[in-house]
Image (cartoon, coloured by chain):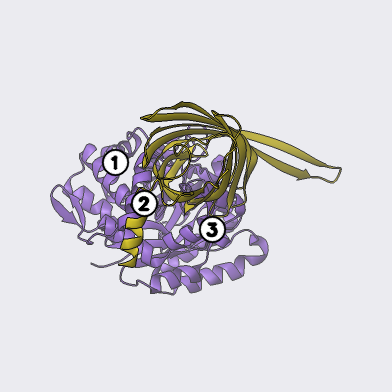
Amino acid sequence: MKWLTAILLLALPLQAEADSRSKISQGATEWTAKGGFAWSGVAARYGVSPRVATLAEVETALFVRWEGRAGLQIQWLDSEAWALDTTLALGAVRQESTVSRQGPQASIVVRISKTGNVEPYLAIHNREFLSMTSTQVLSEEDTTTRWETELLHARGGTLGVVFPTTKHFMVDIGLQMGSMDSAFAIPSFFTAVHWRPSK
Amino acid sequence: MSLFTTKPSTDGKPRITAPKQWAWLLCLAMGCSEDPSGFLYEEQMLEAVDMHLHSGEWSLIPPSTQSYLASNFPFPFSLVPGQLAEQALSAESIVDQLDGAGLKQGVVFAVYAPHSVGVTTNEMVIATIAEAPDRLLGLASLRVDNWEEDSESELAALDAALAHDEMIGIKLAHAHQHFRMDDPAYYDIYEIAAQHQAPIYLHTGPSPFPGTMGAAPYTDASFLEEAIAMFPDANFILGHVGYDFTNKALGTFETCLDLATRYENVYLEPSALGSEGSDPTGENYPAIFRRALEEGLANRMIYGSDGPQYPGFLASYAERTRIAMESADYTLEDAELFLSGNFERIFGLSR
């Protein structure tokens, strides 16, 4: 019963302060914590102009693969009905597992949402990752290092919904499908909490 | 092939393909078990035995092969492949897959290939079988990588393993174990096989696994002919029938057919090659059944899958096998021989 009450409370569309769910106004900050399978992470956004925000994000998949990135979010449209934005980011990947990977990554996310107090959205992402592998060959004379690179992509989409729970907090629930490292990935899901302290 | 066999895509990288993706999802969500009711062919339920299965421990697989295998797991399971692999290789999981495919029994292989596909000891196989003795049997094997010094003790260990009733044959993979098919130094193995009336399963054809020998003396069954002729009391099962997994082609299949035509003690086992990854056009697997029929070798074909590979693989392979047999106009009698009759006859197992 307590769980049911909690779910109903979460689903109740309270009015949050400030902008639409995707947009962040100039001078405002948003902090995000995300948990789920397989990805968890933290992120921060800061509105540098009415249409542009900077962001920094660290994500981990099962605490084995780590991805960090920083970039810009540009708001193209923020009407009463729809919002459209693009996020461009650069970062790095490090994976320490049976298959180890490391290297730089470039990312673009295009997100369209139906604006309102409860805001469903679709975000399409494409991340290009230059995996760099070094092999050391030890011989009697010397040691040589050989670098190999491989361009891998992660492409897919996220279907989610953002809704406020209190004046400063919003909850974001999503399902992500697509590829990872140019191969099929099991769909992932997440719940995120966004916190927008008053300016 | 061996544990969690993966077939490379055209760019040489292992790729998980669409049916596998959904098999993963469905089996993870719902489980793969069905009633072990039998293998349906031409509206008849037939008994079927999968003579090529693997169990084992992830830690006994070399790192390069672990990486290769992990690449076949969908993200994020590719990040933690060991746990998933060991679960899939357990007796419980294997029996679950046998049930899902409608198979009566399976045969688990011991493997001693420390520089390629890894090690599954005879003792590990015996322990796996002990968990499901009514469903599992085993093939024993032996190390050959220090043969000059260890041959006597290794042969004695093989002899001891074959003394277990559930260990019904011998598994060898020259390409994975790095010894030539025509090297007489190893012929004592066939002598033991003949003494125990234990058929010998031999991997034939090129293998994509790291650390595998690809040259003809390790992969081409024609290099086995001397041993086949020398040991008529030993039955030789040519695993994968010479299939070229690297190029997804029939490879030296015709050589295997030729040997089976000329020698009574040669059998053919087309495992792994019929999977979607290894036969993407779906033409090679039926061609093998067709050619076997043309050569009058229906009584030499033995069913194996090379599972468990991934959740749902045994059921998928059984279905592709049914389609291939139908495509090749296999009769009900031919199918019965292939699925269990030939296996039970040469391994001396009564119904």
Whole-number angstrom distance, CA of label 2 to CA of label 3: 27 Å
Chain letter, yellow in picture = A
Q: Position of residue B151 (x, y in %)?
A: 61, 65
Colour of chain B as rendered? purple
Task: Name the residue at the top extreme.
Answer: A76
Mark 2: secondary structure = loop
Task: Identify which amino acid the numbered label 2 is placed on.
Answer: Ser
Mark 3: secondary structure = loop
* B264 relative to B155, above or below: above
Front label number (2 vs 3): 2
A9 or B102, nearer to the observer: A9
* B134 relative to A166, above or below: below
Front label number (3 vs 1): 1
Front label number (2 vs 1): 2
Label 2: chain? Answer: B
Q: Position of residue B97 (x, y in %)?
A: 33, 58
- Say the numbered circle drawn on residue B187: 3
Label 3: chain? Answer: B
> Residue beneath label 1, please?
B289
Give the residue at x 35% y 47%: A13
- Say the numbered circle drawn on residue B305: 2
Whole-number angstrom distance, CA of label 2 to CA of label 1: 15 Å
Task: Identify which amino acid the numbered label 1 is placed on.
Answer: Phe
